Image (spheres, rainbow, N blue to C red):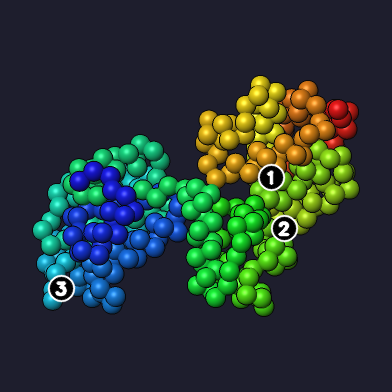
Amino acid sequence: MPNITEADLKKQIKTRSFSPVYLIYGAEQLYVRNYTEKLVKAVAGKAPSDFNFHRFAGEVNITELAAAMYVAPFMSEYNLVLVSDAFFDMMTKEDFETFTEICGKPVEGTVLVISLPSNTPKKATLDAIKKIAAKNGSVCEFKKTDAITTEKFIAKRANKNGKLISRAAANRLVSLCGDDLTRLKNEVDKICAYSSAEEVSLDDINKLATVNLESRIFDLSDAVLAGNGEKAFRVLDSLFYQKEDPIGMLYILSAAYIDAYRARVAAECGIRNSQVAADFGYGKRTFVLDRVMRSTNRVSTEALRKSLDYLMEADLKFKSVKVNQRLYLEQLIAQLLLTAREGRR
């Protein structure tokens, strides 16, 4: 079978028309996890017997896996073998070749499910697994959802908690917490539990949502571009207090400036943000471009270029020599503040 969609997988589960081999993976890990659980329950039942359900994870013993494939179903229609988040990249060449051979020789009565809910192997390794799984079974990839699907997910989750949520509130939640569905699910559950009204308000979200690193870095870059040094250093201090990784902070700060520069150059060429988002694969993060355009409307293009030079220099220094990362980031923020102030237009 070729690659299948979420709808195809749902149909197979509902009709119990199982493939001998499945590969379930993708960026939307909540769906990978949920559909793996649904498939396991459909094949092996809600309380599977140890005779008919064999789970492998992490460092997989290939000999035991091969033996599990040939176990005859006992008082059950199927024998299920689940390989979840195996350390494929750590396997020896011989073990990985044996694993692909196992995938390439389906056993009657056995369903092999390869699930990657959190540990995705390198591209070459994944491509090899995808090729053999697609040839002998089904491959289902859960890509990142778009903005509309994410909004529907948030609304549906709020409804399960007995609450309503507006589109504006859902967008605000995504802008604060990011677009990871697992994180959003937990945030919606938490906010609904604390909210006393029938509808989750923007105020509820602003008070209760746990802001992710990217959003806090946006606050930092907004403060820098606005020339608000006091706020910029206050945000930076809170990030260090919460023990955020300086390299991660620099990476996201650089990404924010790259977003700003892309949006600026595109605007100067008469290109809309929607087209920039499509060209550079922003997906449901188009709002980022709108936000940085507002933040940088008083900063010159030349100042943005100069800021990117400082950020590139910082990245090279972090990777090549040992520096006091906190002190260096504080100096970098000071440089960016000065550049933004000098580049007012």
Q: Which residue is mark 1?
A: 249
Residue drawn at point x = 15 percent, y = 73 percent:
76
* In this rendering, the label closer to the viewer, 1 or 3: 3
Instruction: Identify which amino acid the numbered label 1 is placed on.
Output: Met
Asked whether residue 333 appears in the rendered view, the answer is no
The residue closer to the viewer here, 13 or 88, is 13
Residue drawn at point x = 29 percent, y = 63 percent:
39
Q: Which badge, 2 or 3, is on the more N-terminal residue?
A: 3
Q: Mark 3 Cα within 10 Å, few/some/many (few <14, many 20+)? A: some
In the rendered image, residue 308, in percent from the top left (x then y), is placed at 72, 29
The residue closer to the viewer here, 60 or 69, is 69
Q: Which quadrant does the C terminus fall into?
A: top right
Picture layout, residue 49 above or below residue 99: below
Q: Which mark is residue 76?
A: 3
Q: Which residue is mark 2?
A: 242
* Left-right relation of 114 to 234: left
